[in-house]
């Protein structure tokens, strides 16, 4: 691919969701209405500027931000590229592991290790090809040297591999305390999410080299995989840690009307498919295993959407008091073709708005730079990396 120049097209953010709550189809999930938060919707004075940083990216899936203002981008068909601060797209980086690229599968997440400045280590998630048409979710770490990966080490493998191209995950996040979290989708085999002896439908927690931390919740049990941190998940493509608190947040594709946000805690069960707000896409009825939106011993989401946005990457914007978007959680929406901004008060969600609706593009990933800029990827044949500049706060 030839280097691409930056097209600096100014666009206005469109707010699809300024208005009454039912128009957004979202609600604060709670076991009691009395504790449900009031959702405040902002009006169109919150619009900001959008710049195209780069285009010509084929179904980009994830973007990592370097300190010098350049980027590292995965393309789902199996390529990893650098993008310069001015939008020049590099040739594919050598040394990426083989990936299976059917359906939702391919090269997925990329993250810089917390000590990247010293170690030059990166983390990838991807779908690894197996025998007889099978494939498995995997994660690896490698050293980035120029335009080459060295010392690639696979730290996670879904075992055994399965057939099917849906509900694969997968995002990666670090807690800054020596652990990496990896999401593993249910592979469209729902009840596997409730079985601790199989990988599917889980959030995994490993040490940075792929070892099993001794304080993982199911270590020592013969009927459980020791990598599991939490279970009862469907298909998570968003994972981020709140820099203010260290709290881990996870977004999850539900069935129809069941997309949700969770705060996954050690050893807990997040319900799928026993407890769910969603319906079977093919019948518009709950799945036969679903007993309701809540179930004993299972954790309810902190937020659900009545109409599934198709949640993908997510990122926090905090510590920027000059920004109108300070204390926000951004989420890419694939099906809804926009960017979700949730306003936070601690761990409570107190507002929701939609940005970038005028692009009409599936938003696959979102990241926040150290200066408070918001970067998104559009999931397209000619995918774009965009920068959003928040409006100034009105104190
Ligand atoms: Ca759930």
Image: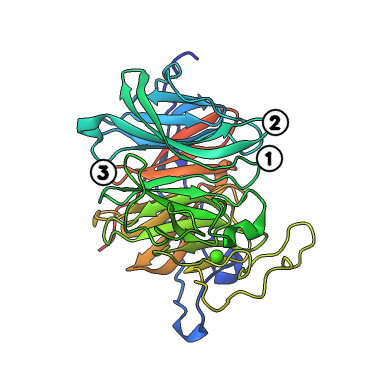
In the rendering, at what x and y percent does residue 325 appear? 34, 56
Q: From the image, tell me which residue sits under label 1.
A: 163
Q: Secondary structure at mark 2?
A: loop
How far is mark 1 from mark 3, CA to CA? 43 Å
Quadrant of image for the C terminus: bottom left
Q: Say what secondary structure mark 3 lies in.
A: loop
Instruction: Check the image and name the residue furthest to the left.
Output: 118
| Secondary-structure class at tag 1 | loop
Q: Which residue is mark 2?
A: 132
Q: Position of residue 289 (x, y in %)?
A: 70, 68
State how far apart marks 2 and 1 are (Cα): 8 Å
Does any portion of residue 15 appear in the rendered image?
no
Q: Quadrant of ligand 1?
A: bottom right
In the displayed structure image, the side of residue 247 where residue 267 appears, left or right: right
Q: Could you tell which of marks 2 and 1 lies nearer the N-terminus? A: 2
Give the residue displayed 49% in from the left and 38% down from the top. Answer: 138
Q: From the Cβ of disc 3, is ligand 1 less than 8 Å away?
A: no
Q: Residues within 10 Å of mark 1 (few under 14, many from 20)?
A: some
Mark 3 closeness class: few <14, some 14–19, many ≥20 residues within 10 Å = few
Callouts 2 and 1 close, C-beta under 8 Å: yes
Residue 312 position within the rendered picture, expressed as x and y whole percent measured from the top left: 52, 48
Name the foreground residue: 319 vs 232.
Answer: 232
- State the residue at coordinates (45%, 67%): 268
Asked if the beta carbon under badge 2 is closer than 8 A to the nearest atom of ligand 1, the reply is: no
Q: Residue furthest top?
A: 2
User: Residue under circle 3?
Assistant: 371
Establish whether ligand 1 lies closer than 8 Å to the Cβ of label 1. Answer: no
* Relative vertical location of residue 108 with respect to residue 47 in this rendering, above or below: above
């Amino acid at each position: 691919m030839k280097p691409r120049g930056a097209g600096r097209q100014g666009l206005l953010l469109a707010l699809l969701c300024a208005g009454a709550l039912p128009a957004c189809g979202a609600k604060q999930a709670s076991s009691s209405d009395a504790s449900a938060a009031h959702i405040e919707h902002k009006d169109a004075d919150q619009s900001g500027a959008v710049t195209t940083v780069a285009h010509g990216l084929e179904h980009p899936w994830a973007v990592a931000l370097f300190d010098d203002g350049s980027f590292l981008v995965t393309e789902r068909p199996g390529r990893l590229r650098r993008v310069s601060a001015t939008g020049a797209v590099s040739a594919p980086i050598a040394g990426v592991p083989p990936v299976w690229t059917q359906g939702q599968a391919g090269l997925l997440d990329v993250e810089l290790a917390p000590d990247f400045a010293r170690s030059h280590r990166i983390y990838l998630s991807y779908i690894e090809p197996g025998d007889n048409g099978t494939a498995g979710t995997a994660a690896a770490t490698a050293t980035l040297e120029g335009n080459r990966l060295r010392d690639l080490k696979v730290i996670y493998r879904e075992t055994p591999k399965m057939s099917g191209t849906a509900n694969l995950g997968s995002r990666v996040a670090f807690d800054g305390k020596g652990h990496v979290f990896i999401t593993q989708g249910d592979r469209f085999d729902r009840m596997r999410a409730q079985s601790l002896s199989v990988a599917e439908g889980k959030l995994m927690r490993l040490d940075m080299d792929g070892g099993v931390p001794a304080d993982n919740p199911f270590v020592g049990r013969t009927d459980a995989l020791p990598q599991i941190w939490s279970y009862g998940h469907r298909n998570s493509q968003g994972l981020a840690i709140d820099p203010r608190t260290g709290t881990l947040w996870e977004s999850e594709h539900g069935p129809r009307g069941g997309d949700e946000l969770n705060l996954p805690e050690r050893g807990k069960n997040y319900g799928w498919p026993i407890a769910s707000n969603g319906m079977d896409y093919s019948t518009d009825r709950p799945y036969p295993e679903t007993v309701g939106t809540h179930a004993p011993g299972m954790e309810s989401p902190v937020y659900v959407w009545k109409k599934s946005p198709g949640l993908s990457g997510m990122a926090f914007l905090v510590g920027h008091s000059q920004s109108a978007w300070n204390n926000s959680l951004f989420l890419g929406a694939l099906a809804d073709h926009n960017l979700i901004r949730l306003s936070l008060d601690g761990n409570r969600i107190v507002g929701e708005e939609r940005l970038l609706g005028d692009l009409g593009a599936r938003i696959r990933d979102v990241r926040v730079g150290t200066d408070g800029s918001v970067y998104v990827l559009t999931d397209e044949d000619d995918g774009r990396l965009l920068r959003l500049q928040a409006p100034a706060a009105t104190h």
